[in-house]
Amino acid sequence: MADTAILDRAGELKGDLVKFSQQPRYDRAASEFLDHYGNGIEELDEQRRMLLWDCFILEHKLANGRTVVEQFVAARTELPETEREMLLGWQDVVQGPFEVIRRDGPALIVESLVDELTYRVRSNMGPSIFRHTPRGSFLIARLVRVGDEWMLSGPITPLRKSDRNIAYRLAMDMALRTPEAVFRNPEKLDLAWKQQRTDRDRFIKHFGADLVVFPGDQAQDRLNGFYAFCREEILGRPEPDGPPAEVAVTLPEDMVYSETVALIYDKTDGIGFYAEFGLVEQAFANPDLLRRRLWREHTLEYLHDDSVEPMVIRRLAERDPDKATTVIRRLLKRPKFDWNRDGETLLREVKPGYYARPPRPRVSPVSERLAAFVTRQ
């Protein structure tokens, strides 16, 4: 349990941090952030503005790659190490809808609808803020760690028990869009890897391979067919209208209009979609095509685009390492390059973001109640 003095100090530091973030030097970055996520500060109501500002100071990476809270800690050299660690820990925000389990003295015990973990929540403004959150109601909030407990960060939105569907829909959307939020629960992470292996087996059963290429204008229908196949296998009955919106994936318009689209279901990287794969595949099979602009541009894009995982290049190269050597030598003007010797080093060089974090499954396991909610829709 967090000491009251620690909670009070956390509240003081949060106030100082907010004041620090209001310096003129952050005006431009804040305006750009609010324009992107909130259509400009002039259009925001007070609660929405406070929510986005909390995101800006704790999580948004500035042009120098640091957050406002990191710069705040760097500027406050007099802070003890425990407070510095606490402040930097606030970059790891727990957010989303929570179900209220009970009151526990000055705290509120809640369960996340996303990761299914329990959190003991306090407010530096006092327990009166919880007067509209009875047992069984829901809370949309952001939490940061303070000692062994959690403190509200930014505004909260209480939902009545009768608003369960709203809370469930928000949780489902978060689970699908930000699976890292689900993986806070290590049991969920283990389950996700298992589900991804099962899902990949279905992909291979449906398409006959873990890599298939279609004309762009057919890719969405083929993908929809796969999700309908998965749903029928899981539920044991056909779905004439296809999978519900919560579990379907809509390909970007530019991908649909490309000449070819590859669907790849990798063991580690999960399912991915890659526009103009056919052109790049042809270049790796016949490096002389790199003399032509279209093949050269798309192959270079595959090398440098962060949305193309290293495994895509690796799969193409492993078909014929000698031709892959020629491709890289011509594209990057590296006459001594050898794929067998230098391939993995190159992938780490051109795709550093991929290697900066541990691999995560692309499947987001949801709780039984969220799954039941989707089934009822």
Image: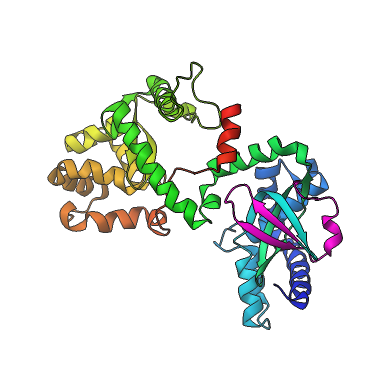
Name the quarter where the C terminus is drawn: top right
73 left or right of 324 in image: right
For the point 66% across and 63% down, the residue is 144
Name the quarter where the N terminus is drawn: bottom right
Vertical placement of 204 versus 6: above or below? above
**Residue 29 is a magenta residue:** no
Q: How is the image coloured?
A: rainbow
For the point 55% across and 36% down, the residue is 371
65 left or right of 322 in image: right
Residue 151 in the image: state x and y as whole percent.
Answer: 72, 63
Residue 54 in the image: state x and y as whole percent.
Answer: 71, 56
* Stretch of the chain drawn in magenta: 108-137
Q: Please identify the quarter of the rendering in which residue 307 is found.
A: top left
For the point 68% across and 78% down, the residue is 76
Which residue is the extreme one toward the top?
Answer: 240
Identify which residue, 11 or 40, lies in the foreground: 11
Q: Is residue 291 visible?
A: no
46 left or right of 259 in image: right
Residue 69 in the image: state x and y as whole percent.
Answer: 65, 66
